Amino acid sequence: MRNVSRSAVEAIVRQLLRETNGNAQGVANAVVAAFSDPSLERIGEPKKSELVVSISARHIHLTDADVETLFGKGKTLTKMKDLYQDGFFAANETVMLIGPRKRMLPSVRILGPTRKESQVELAFTDAISLGLDPPVRESGKLDGTPGCVLVGPAGVVELKKGVIRAARHVHMSPADAEYYGVKDKDMMKLRVESDVCSVVFEDVLVRIGKNIKLEVHLDTDEGNAVDLEHATKIELIK
């Protein structure tokens, strides 16, 4: 017989009492049969979602106002493709990003939808090439971060702040959080095994939200370092 939670047992017993009209022996026999059936899911037990690990390449989030400045009055972002999380997308629009000493990246993708504050997310290698030293931050935590210049076909935006190296993180639903036994802002570990090397990433920030799929985001440097494309096993650890 499988190990199940007390709440699961109570739920099944209540159901069987109704079905057997309260016959105690009938309930006992039915409980044993139910828990011995491997095809039945554990009622009340959190389920394990499929774990997806994505490489989040350099990208930009913009406000509505900055979109209009860069691409023209009344312009909005247009979808190139959907991202894994519902409602999020890679836009057709790109901009030039200029750092200190006039170093630049000619075409950086914008992700939608728009936000309340513009933000640039770079890998460490990107930042070095631009002459920037952005801190590792959770998305949206922009105080004390460096800025840059964005150049679009219709105008220029000078960001006073907003350039970060995104902290590695895992998006999950409340049900996923229950399964792993974690809370929002907790830290987890991600173990990635491959024929090239095996690595454990520590300090994976937990971000919980409704209608969110289980997904870890690594930046380009992290994904390439572990040869993520050829990983043979990936495990999220509390």
Image (cartoon, grey):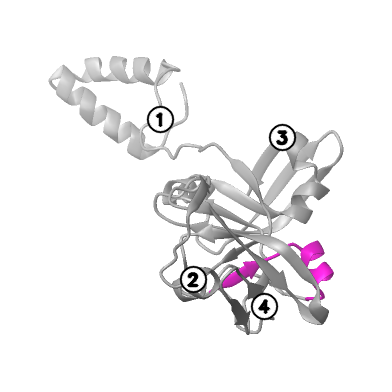
Could you tell me residue 211's position as x and y percent?
40, 49
What residue appears at the point 82 percent right and 49 percent down from the top-left corner?
225
Describe residue 226's horizontal placement relative to residue 12 as left or right.
right
Indicate the amino acid at tag 3: Lys
- Label 3: which residue? 233
The number of callouts visible is 4
Give, as a single range, the part of the protein colored magenta.
118-132
**Residue drawn at (78%, 76%) of the image:** 133
Label 2 or label 1, whichever comes before in sequence order: 1
Rendering coords of residue 113 (x, y %): 46, 60
**Callout 4: helix, strand or loop?**
strand
On the image, the x and y values in percent for residue 147 come to 67, 80
Amino acid under disc 1: Arg
Cβ atoms under marks 2 and 3 closer than 8 Å: no
In the depicted structure, whether residue 156 falls above or below residue 52: below
For mark 2, what is the residue? Answer: 72
Marks 2 and 4, Cα distance to the nearest angstrom? 17 Å
Tell me the mark number nearer the camera, choosing from 3 and 4.
4
**Decide: marks 2, 4 in contact (CB < 8 A)?**
no
**SS label for mark 3:** strand
